[in-house]
Image: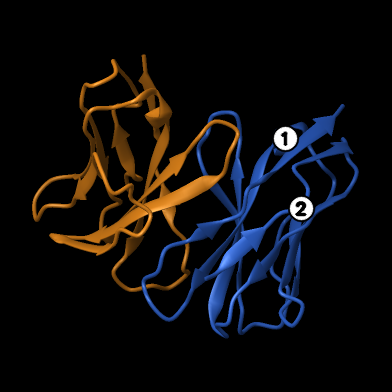
Amino acid sequence: NAGVMQNPRHLVRRRGQEARLRCSPMKGHSHVYWYRQLPEEGLKFMVYLQKENIIDESGMPKERFSAEFPKEGPSILRIQQVVRGDSAAYFCASSPRRQITGELFFGEGSRLTVL
Amino acid sequence: AQTVTQSQPEMSVQEAETVTLSCTYDTSESDYYLFWYKQPPSRQMILVIRQEAYKQQNATENRFSVNFQKAAKSFSLKISDSQLGDAAMYFCAYRRETSYDKVIFGPGTSLSVIP
């Protein structure tokens, strides 16, 4: 049973370019969460999605950041016109439709470096 | 708003000894989950232990146990017989049980294990 899959694992972008990070949840999971971890800091919530719906985007920056979870395919976190401050590890997590244990299952993260 | 506090940015322990990591949280909810996640240098987020707030009995997983004090909103992690592989960042986390809510993480405690 494959876990949460994130790609790319490492992404390098120059300032002003776009970054796209992808996340495939665990099989049977329909809820996806994105977190950002800046160097030497904890995980900060960004957005929570179900298929075709954004449920909670209270942690998303108002500009340049967007997320989607289409009916088919992975969830995508998109960062437009990246700046150096966007350099971070971005983690995706998933949980099942029926909440039993409450935990989130995490991918290995995507590390974005902005030059 | 719910918050999670970890007052120990760094801790160290001698191999085979016991260490306790502190965590406090703030919530007005009565039903929730608490977690300890471990993040080794690989950066993978690994669930160490979970506690449901309605359970009075403290959770235990092998060498890991918690001291859950609901009234005091305290949730400490005890690691017994510490091993070199326990060296990592440890994050305390909270999640409401009443809905598919986000997990809120504390800032983390960096644990070093001294051979």
Q: Residue furthest front?
A: A63
Q: Residues within 10 Å of mark 2 (few under 14, many from 20)?
A: some
> Taking A100 as reference, is B42 left or right?
right
Residue position for label 2: B7
Tell me: residue B81, above or below residue B88: below
- Residue type at mark 1: give it: Ala
Number of numbered callouts drawn: 2
Amino acid identity at mark 2: Ser
Residue B85 coordinates in the image, percent (x, y)? 71, 34
Percent across and percent down for residue B96 are 48, 74
- The residue that disc 1 covers is B87
State which chain disc 2 sits on.
B
Q: CA distance from mark 1 to mark 2?
A: 18 Å
Q: Residues within 10 Å of mark 1 (few under 14, many from 20)?
A: many
Residue placed most toward the observer, B115 or B41: B41
Residue A67 image offset from top left, x and y in percent: 22, 48
Q: Quadrant of residue A31?
A: bottom left
Whichever of callouts 1 and 2 sits on the residue coming sooner in the sequence is 2
Q: Which chain is orange?
A: A
Which chain is blue in the rendering? B
